Image (cartoon, rainbow, N blue to C red):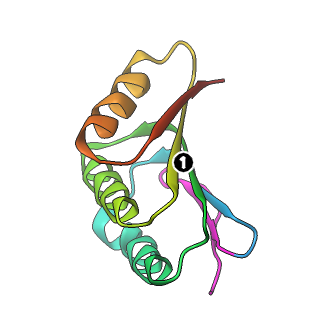
Amino acid sequence: MEIINLEGTEESPKIILDKENSIFEISGRSLPEDAAEFYKPVLEWLESYGQSPNSETLFTFKLEYFNTASSKLILDILSKLEDVTGTKISWYYHEDDEDMSEAGTEFADLVDVPFEFKTY
C-alpha cells in the first residue's frame, strides 16, 4: 500500500499513514482552505486500508488546533476507523488545553472506537 506522508504547515497537519510500519498519525494544526479536498486522499487511503488492515491499528491524533470544517473530516476519519477491527485511538493534547481534551471526549462519544487520552 502506498504511504501517505504529508509535511505539516501553518494551515495543514502532518499526516503519516504507513501500513507496513504501523504508523498512523495526524498532528499539528488543521485549518486547510478546503478541508474536504485536503482530507480526501486520507479517507480514500483508509477505505483501502479497511479492506485488509493490520491486526492492530493504533491511530494517533496530536492536534494543536483544528477549525470547524476539519472537525467534520476528523469525525469522518474516525467513522472509517470504526469499521477497522483492532483499532485504538491515542488522543494527545497539551495538558493545559481543555478545548482539545473536550474535543477528544466528544469524538470518543460519537464513535465506537476505544480512545486513550494522553497529555504532553
Q: Give the residue displayed 44% in from the left and 42% down from the top.
A: 114
Q: Give the residue displayed 57% in from the left and 15% down from the top.
A: 95
16 over 28 or under it: above or below: below
46 over 26 or under it: above or below: below
Q: Give the residue displayed 60% in from the left and 61% down from the top.
A: 56
Quarter of the image with the N terminus in it: bottom right
Question: How many neighbours does mark 1 have within 10 angstroms: few (below 14), some (14-19), or many (20 or more)?
Answer: few
- In the current view of this chain or complex, which residue is farthest to the top? 96
Residue in the foreground of this view, choosing between 21 and 28? 21
Relative to 25, is 73 on the left or the right?
left
In magenta, the rendered stretch is: 1-19
Question: In the rendering, at what x and y percent does residue 17 appear?
Answer: 60, 68
Question: In the rendering, at what x and y percent does residue 37 appear?
Answer: 33, 73
Question: In the rendering, at what x and y percent does residue 25 appear?
Answer: 60, 55
Disc 1 marks a residue whose amino acid type is Glu
* Residue 79 visible, this orientation: yes
Relative to 107, is 118 on the left or the right?
right
Q: Does dot 1 land on a helix, a strand or a loop?
A: loop
Residue in the foreground of this view, choosing between 105 and 71? 105
Reply yes or no: does residue 13 show up in magenta.
yes
Question: In the rendering, at what x and y percent does residue 13 appear?
Answer: 53, 53
> To which residue does mark 1 refer?
10
* Residue 33 visible, this orientation: no
Reply yes or no: does residue 17 show up in magenta.
yes
Residue in the foreground of this view, choosing between 100 and 57? 57
Q: Quadrant of residue 33?
A: bottom left
99 over 57 or under it: above or below: above
Q: Give the residue displayed 30% in from the left and 59% down from the top.
A: 79
